Image (cartoon, rainbow, N blue to C red):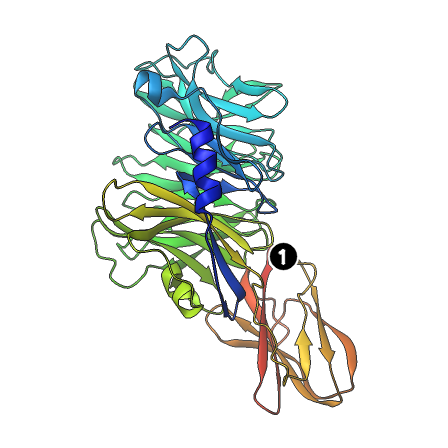
């Protein structure tokens, strides 16, 4: 299908359905046929693949879906990876056709220069294998670094490319590896490294060092990293045998694992949940939950609600997904957590995919008119060693401000008593009631009054 037809279909087919939930007003915007894989920080630019041709596209509300050319599947029948996008939407990484149409290579696209090939030449030990130098799987938020894999004979190895240094092999411990994402400046790279027994280990590359986040016994991976490089998302089966969505939070020189679980109905050996993206403050996580071959759902995870099938959120909001479509994956989230892109699959012929953006007008609980206080976001967030929690009292009254951990256990009470009307700031120093330092992780503040009304806010302690 040519670009003009895609744009026309997108304009005609844009459908806005809305409803209200604890996330505020919820809308779903259908952007046209294709598979969105990433979204810009402000939620206005989406990258993905077209249906059929598997050609990289860029979408905005003004242009619709714009195929970017250099389609490798169309010419050589080969494609890999998924397009990723820089925070400002100016750069896109993808696997593309080489200039002479005889090979597949990782590439970076920009409005200024079009496509730039990351290879050839490959890293010094790299080579052309099965008409491919490698494939692109991610790009740093600043657009400077493209990551993925390159071929060394028949073995895949993770690489990072930038315009100054070209492609650089990042190394593997025993065999294959792949890098899936990079933080803001490309200094923290995440993906998977092969275990001695052939499965994948969630892995981070940093300062020339390869670190296995978890010694899993199944095919698990790291798939996303926050801009500051302090939180990583992916999947893990450590100690459970079930491939669960997982996050790792930096704690000094180590990484602390937090298992997020799976959606109900997920069964081994085919079921798994994988984190695809994380909001910069770590408070909202999105991904895919596979139930069995050919069946999956997009999930959203928050501290307040845990893991939720996105269809449940839409249903609660009164938002209807058109008949014949099923939401299969949530792939990208904007910096403020209010815009999420993903893929819906057609459950009837012609079995294609439709792209969408879910818009959440407010990602925190909205105080009702009867609530006499407000709980503002803490700052800084993430924080170390302390954070400020602002509260606003609409009138004089009693109020309680408490800190809870991710398991719902109360860690600290910062205030319990009268508060005059106005704005007040409370500082939490990352210590519990006994003045013991708590561990890195996700915590939330809870403000309540004597009527039973309460509000929550998430925050992340990093060390």
**Closest to the observer: 257 or 452?**
452
Q: In the rendered view, would you say 74 is above or below 442?
A: above
Quarter of the image for residue 403 reads: bottom right
Q: Quadrant of the C terminus?
A: bottom right
Q: Is 210 rendered above or below residue 13?
A: above
Crowd tier of the residue under label 1, counting other residues whose Cα lies within 10 Å: few below 14, some 14–19, many 20 or above: many
Across and down, in percent, residue 164 comes to 62, 18
* Residue 249 x/y as whole percent: 52, 53
- Write the residue at 59% across / 36% down: 89
Q: Quadrant of the N terminus?
A: top left
Left or right of residue 370, residue 96 in this image: left
Q: Position of residue 332 (x, y in %)?
A: 48, 46
Residue 347 showing in the rendered view: yes
100 on left or right of 42: left
Q: How many marks?
A: 1
Q: Nearer the viewer, residue 72 or 326?
A: 326
Residue identifier under label 1: 382
In this picture, residue 31 sits left or right of residue 362: left
């Amino acid at each position: 299908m040519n670009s003009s037809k895609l744009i026309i279909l997108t304009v005609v087919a844009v459908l806005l359905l809305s409803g209200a939930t604890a996330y505020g007003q919820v809308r779903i915007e259908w952007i046209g046929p294709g598979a969105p894989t990433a979204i810009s920080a402000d939620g206005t630019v989406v990258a993905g693949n077209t249906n059929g041709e598997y050609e990289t596209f860029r979408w905005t509300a003004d242009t619709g879906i714009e195929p970017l050319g250099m389609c490798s599947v169309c010419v050589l029948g080969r494609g890999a990876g998924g397009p990723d996008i820089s925070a400002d939407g100016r750069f896109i990484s993808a696997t593309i056709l080489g200039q002479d149409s005889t090979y597949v290579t990782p590439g970076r696209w920009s409005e200024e220069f079009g496509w730039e090939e990351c290879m050839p030449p490959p890293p010094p030990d790299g080579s052309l294998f099965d008409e491919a130098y490698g494939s692109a799987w991610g790009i740093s938020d600043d657009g400077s670094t493209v990551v993925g894999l390159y071929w060394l004979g028949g073995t895949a190895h993770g690489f990072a490319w930038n315009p100054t240094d070209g492609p650089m092999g990042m190394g593997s411990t025993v065999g294959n590896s792949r890098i899936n994402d990079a933080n803001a400046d490309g200094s923290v790279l995440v993906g998977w490294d092969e275990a001695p027994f052939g499965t994948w280990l969630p892995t981070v590359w940093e300062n020339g060092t390869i670190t296995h986040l978890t010694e899993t016994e199944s095919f698990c991976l790291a798939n996303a990293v926050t801009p500051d490089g302090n939180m990583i998302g992916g999947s893990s089966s450590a100690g459970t045998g079930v491939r669960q969505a997982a996050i790792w939070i930096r704690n000094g020189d180590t990484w602390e694992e937090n298992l997020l679980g799976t959606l109900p109905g997920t069964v081994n050996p085919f079921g798994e949940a994988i984190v695809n993206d994380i909001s910069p403050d770590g408070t909202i996580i999105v991904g895919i939950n596979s139930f069995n071959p050919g069946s999956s759902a997009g999930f959203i995870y928050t501290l307040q609600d845990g893991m939720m099938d996105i269809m449940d959120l839409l249903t609660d909001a009164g938002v209807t997904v058109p008949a014949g479509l099923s939401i299969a994956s949530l792939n990208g989230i904007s910096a403020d957590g209010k815009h999420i892109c993903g893929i819906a699959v057609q459950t009837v012929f012609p079995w294609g995919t439709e792209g969408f953006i879910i818009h959440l007008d407010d990602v925190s609980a909205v105080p009702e008119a009867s609530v006499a206080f407000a709980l503002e976001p803490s700052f800084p967030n993430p924080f170390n060693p302390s954070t400020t929690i602002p509260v606003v009292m609409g009138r004089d009254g009693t109020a309680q401000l408490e800190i809870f951990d991710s398991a719902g256990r109360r860690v600290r009470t910062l205030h319990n008593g009268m508060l005059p009307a106005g704005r007040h700031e409370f500082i939490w120093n990352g210590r519990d009631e006994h003045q013991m330092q708590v561990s890195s992780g996700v915590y939330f503040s809870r403000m309540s009054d004597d009527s039973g009304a309460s509000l929550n806010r998430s925050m992340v302690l990093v060390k």
